[in-house]
Amino acid sequence: MTPTPVLQRLSESLDSMSPQVRRAAAYVLDNPSEVAVTSLRAMADAADVKPNTMVRMARAAGFGGYEDFRQPFRTEVVDAQLSFPDRARFLQSINEGGRHGALLSNMVASALGNVEMLFASVDPEELKSAADLLVSARRANVLGVGTAKPLAENFAYVASMSSGPQAGQVAAIPVLGLAIDDVAKMTSSDVLMAMTFSPYRAEIIEAVNLAADRDVPIVTITDSWASPIVAPSAYAFVVPNESPLPFSSNVATVALLEVILAFMVADSDDDAASAIDAFHANRRAAGIYSG
């Protein structure tokens, strides 16, 4: 077992937990990388709960005790460390040239680490199911605001490019007005794919909750299993977004979106390659491309 199903189970169980156990679970959901390398007592101190509360949390997740709960996290760390010597040598090779060399090294380490952590934990079957859901929808609505807005728009643009005439529509929302205006028009034949990262945007949370109330299937991309948009989702993907700079990284999010797009193309009933060729042929005929 990988940490992902453990974190999913915790996230789904939050509402049924006592306040103290919920506090412990929320800390784990926000800090999963600490589970493998931090003692039970230190984790309890960091979460501001008693050690036996961490044990109760592990049992609430379906494990016999805290050590059983930790095992998937330890396994992931061992697997990840297999490539560490080569990674270290690579980073040392670019950590030259003074201050900017060190900055480059830190940025590269962060970007590579985020992508590796994402793909070490993501479930291919979950990705395939989410992609199939988007492909089969009457309309797949992609929602992001702030830094996630261009990600949503690019995803919708590329997905539409590779969709044949019989495929459902993929569109970024909101087109005009508020996201909830678009969600209010959705049915269970549509899909909402929403993105938000800490600090979570209220309009995204509101749109996801409204979609859930309307029985609209939801795919979410966020940065913690404790994120408020995880619980209502049919499929949720948590992306690492750590950065040495005072803003979050989008590298892993972009990588995940590209994989979902690839799965959508692979699983589409339409001839995606022909659709892409026709898209570019039309643009060449119109003189859009210079080469």
Image: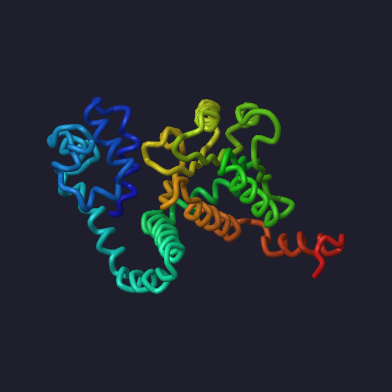
Identify the image quadrant of the N terminus: bottom left
Tell me: residue 68, above or below residue 83. above
Can residue 90 be seen in the rendering of this structure?
A: yes
Q: Position of residue 277 (x, y in %)?
A: 74, 65
Task: Indicate the colouring scheme.
Answer: rainbow
Judged from this view, the residue extending furthest toward the right is 286
Q: In which quadrant will I find the C terminus?
A: bottom right
Which quarter of the picture shows residue 79?
A: bottom left
Residue at x-position 35% and y-position 42%: 8
In the picture as drawn, the residue positioned furthest to the front comes out as 98
Q: Position of residue 240 (x, y in %)?
A: 41, 50
Residue in the foreground of this view, choosing between 96 and 56 = 96
The reply to whether residue 240 is in sight is no
Q: Is residue 285 left or right of residue 255?
A: right
Left/right placement of residue 56 relative to residue 253 reads: left
Is 220 situated left or right of 5 in this image? right
Q: Residue at x 62, y 40 (%)?
A: 141
Q: Position of residue 73 (x, y in %)?
A: 26, 53
